[in-house]
Amino acid sequence: MTSAFATSLHGRPSGLRLDTLIRLRWLAVTGQIAALVVVNLGLGFPLPLSSCLAVVVLSAAVNVLLRVKYPVARRLGDAAAGPLLAYDVLQLTALLYLTGGLKNPFVLLYLAPVMISATTLAWGTTVLLGILAVACAGTVGLWARPLPWAGSDIPVLPELYLAGIWVSLSVSVGFIGLHAWRVAEEARELADALAATELVLAREQHLTALDGLAAAAAHELGTPLSTISLVVKEMQRSMTDDDPHAEDVALLRDQANRCRDILQTLTSLRSGDAPFDRMPLALLLEEVVEPHRNFGIGIHVSVKDDPGAPVIARNPGLLYGLGNLVENAVDFASSRVDISAEWSTAGLDIVVADDGPGFAPEVSGRIGQPYVTSRARDRLEPDGESGLGLGFFIAKTLLERTGASLTFENRPPPGTGAVIGIHWPRTALAIEVDPRATNGRSSD
């Protein structure tokens, strides 16, 4: 997976949909009109109704203008959505100024634009909106018209209490905004990483499909090619050495033999009916390890001695997941990677261990989560690009889909290196015993 692809996945949020913003503002306009009517007509509290309605009507006009001028399916980036949410903060400030400022219980609505920004826009935009909301709340705390109230016994709140409300609102804006942004960011990371996993698996399945097509082509072409070879052989037998076509027939026979060799190669390279074919464990591990043997790191594979070797279902997710773990072990190993496999009535256990530095303390508790990486830029990526932090996540996701459970730990001191354990219950991989298999096998 390329770095450009990672940037497109794990970049900034995709923005706020204009239709969503318009619907939320209509909801706010409806609520504001209902509150004004209830307070003024229902409770009989005097308030500057015409001024308040003018502020609300302005928001409705902005909504109508947006719906008419722009397609509602348009997604707004920070440059467009930020000012629109800032307008909502200022509109609320105008209403609060006319209806009591910080004494008005609806001052908590300052949280709404900040929350919307935290879940859909970049962190910088959310911070600016939070600062604007806190500043506007402080402004209406200092300058505002009296709180609408019926009768002469108007409540007077101490200035210290109003200051406390402002501090509480400021803390709420910061804490809730940060919390909402963090939760939304984790959800976006997980969705992006799952999309990357699905892309990798789709590629593996596509390769498997191509293998099957190659095998089918080899099978279908085998019969006519045999017929051609037989006819050419009979023609060659019936010709004399001085026949002018003898050389052409010999060339035709050579080319037919070459086609036969190519078809045999296609047949030998195919992966059978994956993911439905079955392989002995030792052979499967060797297939996983083979692409990583020529990198200066010794890879030692050992399978427990047993009268029968396990035979398990082979699928792209299993192969890619194990291959990813082996690749990471080879990347970080100093000189050696050990892969061992044992099975019992409980299931199958595979351990991948290296002699490298092991998992870094700052990531050891988050191994398997998306975008967690400790790859050194200068060690593994000579072009200056670090790992994407998706390797373990993809491997863990694919292997868990086959029924496996994974553990990640470091070797106990004084040893160094990472140890990854994978366990499958016997029913998860449909483990069978091949009576024709030899006793345990070890390869270096």
Image (cartoon, rainbow, N blue to C red):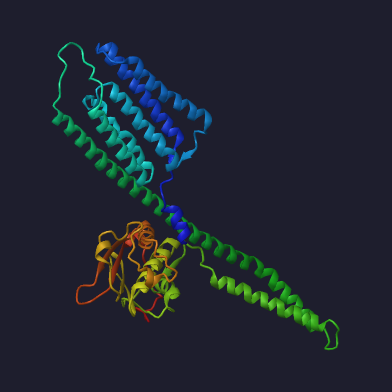
Q: Residue at x 44, y 57 (%)?
A: 6
Q: Residue at x 47, y 25 (%)?
A: 64
Q: Is residue 162 visible?
A: yes
Q: Position of residue 28 (x, y in %)?
A: 36, 26
Q: Quadrant of the C terminus?
A: bottom left
232 lies left or right of 192: right
Q: Position of residue 96 (x, y in %)?
A: 28, 25
- Number of numbered markers: 0
Q: Position of residue 430 (x, y in %)?
A: 37, 62
Q: Is residue 313 visible?
A: no
Residue ranking furthest to the front: 143
Q: Residue at x 62, y 72 (%)?
A: 263
Q: Position of residue 50 (x, y in %)?
A: 35, 15
Residue ranking furthest to the bottom: 241
Instruction: Give the camera-side residue of 72 and 260.
Output: 72
Instruction: Give the camera-side residue of 38 and 83.
Output: 83
Q: Would you place residue 201 above or below residue 262 in this image?
A: above
Instruction: Give the camera-side residue of 115 and 265.
Output: 115
Instruction: Give the camera-side residue of 141 and 72.
Output: 141
Q: Would you place residue 327 above or below residue 103 in this image?
A: below
